[in-house]
Amino acid sequence: MAHELVTPAEQATKNDVDYIFYELTRSICPECKRVIDAKVLLRHGKVFMRKRCPEHGEIESLIYSDAEAYVRLSRYNKPGTIPLDFSTPIANGCPHDCGLCPDHQQHACVGIIEVNSACNMTCPLCFANAGAGYNLTLDEVKGILDRFVETEGDPQVVQFSGGEPTIHPQIVEMVRAARDREIPYVMINTNGKRLATDARFVHQLAELKPDIYFQFDGFDRNTYEVIRGEPEILEEKVRALDRLAEIGCRVILVPAIERGVNEHEVGKIVEFGLSHPAVRGINFQPAFHAGRHGPHDPLQRMTIPDIVSLIAEQTDGQFVDTDFVPIPCCFPTCNSVTYAYIDENGPLPLPRILNVDDYLDYITNRPLPDLGDEVKSALEGLWSSAASPGSSQAAQDFAISCAACGLPGDLDLEAFADRMFMIMLQDFMDPWTFNQKNVMKCCKEILLPDGYQIPFCAYNSVGYREQAREQLTARERARIRARREGEDFNPEPITFDFSDKR
Ligand code: SF4
Ligand code: SF4
Ligand code: SF4
C-alpha cells in the first residue's frame, strides 16, 4: 500500500492561544499560600488569573468580567501618598513584610481595628471566620489609634470591626477614644443585631454618632439563610435601621452579592437605600472567599462589572455602567463609585452631567477648564476611600461638583448632604484572586497592636489573620491569668513567620 508523504512542516501546525497575555504579577496558592507568579489573561471579553503552584498545580480564577474596561480603566491611577512613618522593614519581600513597609505605595485612607474575634452570628460566609478568641483592651485600642495618628498625621477614617464590634463591652469608649483624637469619620461595621435589640446601646451611640457600615444582603429568606445562616433576620435589620434614622446616624448598606443567591436583589437594595432616611449610600461587595465560606467555583465568581450590569438592569437605568468611575487612590480595579444628586425626579448620577473622567484621569492629564483645580480637588475628595457620604466635607465637595455642572448652587450644606447618595462597588481579593500589584497600593489597612498596619486583602489571604488571632488569643489568656494571680503583665510583641511560604 502506498503511503502519502507528509512533510515535517505539514505535521507541525502552530496554534494560537485563545487569550491575550496581558501582564505578569505575583499571587499565592490558595491551598498552601506560598507566593507564586501569576499571569493575567484577557479571554473572551473577561480577565482571568492563571498561576501554578509547584505542589498544587494550575489554578485559574475570574478576576474581572469586562476585559475592555479592565484595560481602559488603568488611567484612573493617581500617584500614591507616602505615610509619615513605616512600621516594618523590607526583609522578605512583598507580601511578607506588612507593614506598612517602605515598599508600600499608598498611605492608609481607612484604618480598620478588629476589636474582637467573636460574633453574635455564625454566618457561613465570613472573611473574619468569627468565633471565640480575643477582645482587644481599651488601652490596646488607644495605642493603635495613637500609632495611626503618628503614621498618618491627620487620619481620616477609622472603622471598628470584628467579629462583631458592638458586642465588645468597651466599644462606646473605643469610639470616644477615636473622636478624642479628632479622627473625623469613625465607623462601626455591624450586623445590626445589638442595635435592633438594645435601646440603651443605641442611646449611647446617639451622643457619638458614628457612621454605620451595615451588613444588608437583600430581602429574601433564602439569601439570609445561605449567606448568614439566619433566614428571618430581615425584620431585625430594618428595626435597627429605623433606630439609626431616629438618632441621626449615617448608614452605608453593605451587601455581599453571591452568584446564584442574591443577584436578583440588587435593584431592590438600591431602591430601599434611596428611600430609607438613615441610608446615605451602598457598598456592594462581590462575595469573596477568604476565612469561612462554602465551596465555590473561582471561574464563576461575581466581579464589579457583573454587579454594575445587575444595577443597570434592575434599576431601569437609574444607574448605568458609565456612571461608575474607579477610585484612583488604589488600583482602579479594586473599587468604583458614583454619587447621585437626589431630587423629586429621582437620582441624577454626577458623571452624567460633569465629565468626572477628565478630572480623575491621571495618565492623559487633559487641561482643565477655569476653576478646574477646585473641582478636581472636590472630586478627589469624593472619589476616595475616605469619603463619607452625608458628612459636611463630602457635602461641600458634592456642592462644588454640582455647582460646576449647573445644579442648584444656592442650597446650604445640610441640604446637599441630604441630596447626595453614593453607590460603591468594592471587590476584595481572596487567595484565588490575590494580586500583589493591588495589595502594594492598598489604602485600607488592618491596624493591630504593636504598630502593624496590614493591607486588608493581605491580612485575609496570606496568613496574617490566622497568626495574629492565635497570638492575640494567647495574649488575652495570659492577661487573664496574670490578673487572677495578681502579677504584672508584659505581653510579647506580635510576630509573623512566613518562612515556609517563600
Ligand atoms: S503589601 Fe505593602 S506593606 Fe505589605 S509587604 Fe507589600 S509593600 Fe510591604
Ligand atoms: S460575617 Fe460578620 S456578622 Fe457574620 S459571623 Fe462574620 S463577623 Fe459575624
Ligand atoms: S482592600 Fe483589597 S480591594 Fe481594597 S484597596 Fe486594598 S487591595 Fe484593593
Image (tube, rainbow, N blue to C red):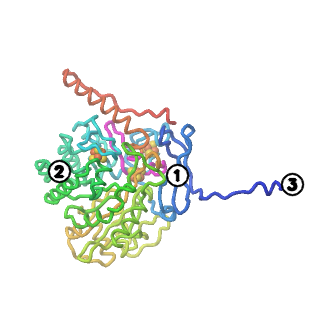
Q: Amino acid at mark 3?
A: His
The reply to whether residue 373 is in sight is: no
Of residue 413 and residue 168, the one placed in the foreground of this image is: 168
User: Which residue is located at x 34 percent, y 58 percent?
Assistant: 262
Secondary structure under the numbered disc 2 in the rendered image? helix
In the rendered image, which quarter is residue 244 located in? Answer: bottom left
Labels 2, 3: front one? 3
The answer to which of marks 2 and 3 sits earlier in the sequence is 3
Q: Residues within 10 Å of mark 2 (few under 14, many from 20)?
A: many
Q: In the rendering, at what x and y percent does residue 499 appear?
A: 49, 32
Q: Is residue 455 above or below residue 75?
A: above
Estimate the x, y position of residue 75 in percent, counting from the top left. 48, 63
- In magenta, the rendered stretch is 435-457
Q: Which residue is mark 3?
A: 3
Q: What's the residue type where badge 1 is placed? A: Met
Q: Which residue is mark 2?
A: 195
Amino acid carrying mark 2 in the image:
Leu
Q: Which residue is mark 1?
A: 49
The question of residue 456 being in magenta is answered with yes
Neighbours of disc 3 within 10 Å: few (<14), some (14-19), many (20+): few
SS of the residue under disc 3:
loop
Residues under labels 2 and 3: Cα distance?
A: 84 Å
Left or right: residue 55 versus residue 384 is right
**In percent of the image, x 24 and y 27: which residue is there?**
479
